Amino acid sequence: MARKRNEAERERLLQIAYKLMTEQGFENTSLSDIAKAANITKSLVQYYFPAKEIIATTLIERGLNTIYEQISKDKEINIPNSVVMAFAVGYVLFNYSFYNSVITKFLVQEYIENRLYTMQVVDIGLEWFEEKEPKLFAKLREEDPHFDDKLSFAFGGIIEYVYECNENGREIDGDFIIEFALKTIEPSFKLIVDDDTDLINISMYFPDDWFKKHVKEYNKKMFGI
């Protein structure tokens, strides 16, 4: 008889895994480490998370869903269409990731040191949004045959920029990253939205201090903190 999943246990393991990864890094955290900290067997950890990469994927998807919910229910924010929502979710995720003391510099640093990890975040984000808006992506590809190539170019360029900054000890300019990404992919999105829709200045949709106001809510939903 198959074991019945226990959502509370799965959540507990997720929180333990995140804590270990922030303390010792993703690469240095094994499923055995998680099992030991949780006082259970490794096989039980694998029952919920067959590989630690699934833990990372789960956290990234949870982050996207949490942000999407925060934006959707906030009456202070007026998102005019699904295209702006896509840009807004990415914008908020970037800010929460780089300017949030709970997401330790150690963990962020490890991800930006590794192109594979960084690309994983991008791929999961794109897959997540395409699942939410399949018709939107189908229309984008219909209107712009090079849409996927432009996405790869934009995010590939960001990854290389972040990687080079890290390699050479230069500070990462978050404003530059956002501006570069938006300017690269905006023309494709502009094909299917009104000319008045402002995609470049995505920050204009958020009130001052919005991130500071909502970061605790985000961290509680994400990490139980």
Image (cartoon, rainbow, N blue to C red):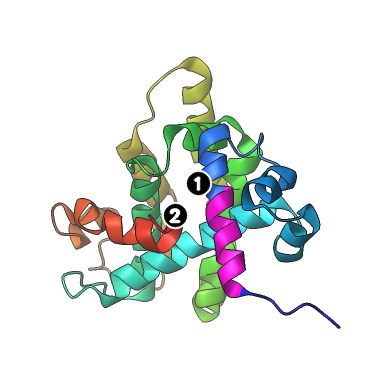
Confirm whether the magenta stretch covers residue 127: no
Residue in the picture at 64% in, 74% down: 6
Q: What quarter of the picture does the C terminus occupy?
A: bottom left
Residue flagged by tag 1: what amino acid is it? Ala
Crowding at dot 2, Cα within 10 Å, few <14 / some 14-19 / many 20+, comes out as many
Residue range corresponding to the magenta coloring: 7-17
Residue in the picture at 75% in, 61% down: 44
Q: Which type of secondary structure does the marked residue at label 1 adopt?
A: helix
Q: How many discs mark residues in the rendered view?
A: 2
User: Relative to 160, does residue 7 appear above or below in the rendering?
Assistant: below
- Answer with left or right where residue 148 lies relative to residue 85: right
Q: Is label 1 in contact with label 2 (beta carbons under 8 Å)?
A: yes
Identity of the residue furthest to the right in this view: 1
Between the C-alphas of marks 1 and 2, the distance is 7 Å
- Of 196 and 216, nearer the camera is 216
Residue flagged by tag 2: what amino acid is it? Ile
Confirm whether the magenta stretch covers residue 10: yes
Crowding at dot 1, Cα within 10 Å, few <14 / some 14-19 / many 20+, comes out as some
Residue at which label 2 appears: 185
Tell me if I can see residue 85 in this picture: yes
- Answer with left or right where residue 37 lies relative to residue 42: left
Tell me if I can see residue 141 in this picture: no
Where is residue 161? Give x, y as percent. 49, 31
User: Relative to 113, does residue 85 appear above or below in the rendering?
Assistant: below
Residue in the picture at 41% in, 19% down: 170
